[in-house]
C-alpha cells in the first residue's frame, strides 16, 4: 500500500484532507513560479525590442517633435522638408479646432 493510504487508515479522513490541500498548494506554487519566469522573460524581451525600435526611429521622432513644437509656437502649420501624414497633422488639427472654439 502507498504511504498516504497507510496514513489515511491510521489517522483518518483529516490526514487525507490536509494531504490534498498541501499537495495542491505545492503543485500550484511550482506552476506559478514557472509561469512567472516565463512571463518575465517574455516581457523583458518585449521591452528590449521596443527600445530597439524607438532607437531606430529616433530621427523620425525628433523631426515630428520639432515640427509639432514649431507649429504650436507659430500658431500656423510649419512645413519642413516634407509633410508626413501622422501625429503632427493630427495634433495641428486638434489645436486649430480648440483655438477656433476658444474664440467663439
Image: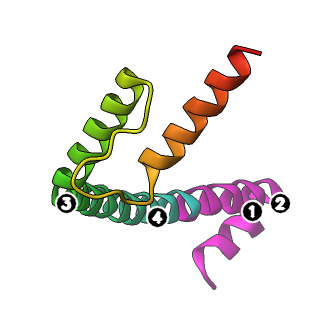
Circles 2 and 1 in contact, beta carbons < 8 Å: yes
Do residues under tags 2 and 3 come within 8 Å of each other at their CB atoms?
A: no
Query: In the rendered structure, which segment of residues is drawn in magenta?
Result: 1-27
Residue behind mark 4: 35
Along the line of sight, which residue is nearer the eye, 49 or 6?
49
Mark whose residue sits in front, 2 or 3:
3
C-beta proximity under 8 Å, tags 3 and 1: no
Q: Which residue is mark 3?
A: 52
Q: Residues within 10 Å of mark 4 (few under 14, many from 20)?
A: few
In the picture provided, is 68 more to the left or to the right than 56?
right
In the rendered image, the vertical position of residue 98 relative to residue 34, given as above or below = above
Mark closer to the chain start, 3 or 4: 4
| Viewport quadrant of the N terminus | bottom right
Query: Which of the numbered marks, if any, corresponds to residue 16?
Result: 1
Q: Earlier in the sequence, mark 4 or mark 1?
A: 1
Cα distance in 3D space between marks 2 and 3: 58 Å
Amino acid at each position: 500500500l502507498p504511504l498516504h493510504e497507510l496514513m489515511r487508515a491510521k489517522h483518518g479522513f483529516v490526514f487525507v484532507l490536509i494531504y490534498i490541500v498541501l499537495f495542491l498548494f505545492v503543485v500550484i506554487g511550482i506552476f506559478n513560479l514557472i509561469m512567472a519566469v516565463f512571463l518575465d522573460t517574455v516581457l523583458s524581451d518585449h521591452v528590449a525590442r521596443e527600445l530597439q525600435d524607438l532607437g531606430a526611429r529616433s530621427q523620425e521622432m525628433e523631426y515630428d517633435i520639432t515640427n509639432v513644437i514649431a507649429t504650436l509656437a507659430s500658431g500656423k502649420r510649419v512645413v519642413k522638408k516634407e509633410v508626413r501624414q501622422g501625429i503632427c497633422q493630427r495634433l495641428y488639427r486638434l489645436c486649430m479646432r480648440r483655438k477656433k472654439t476658444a474664440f467663439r
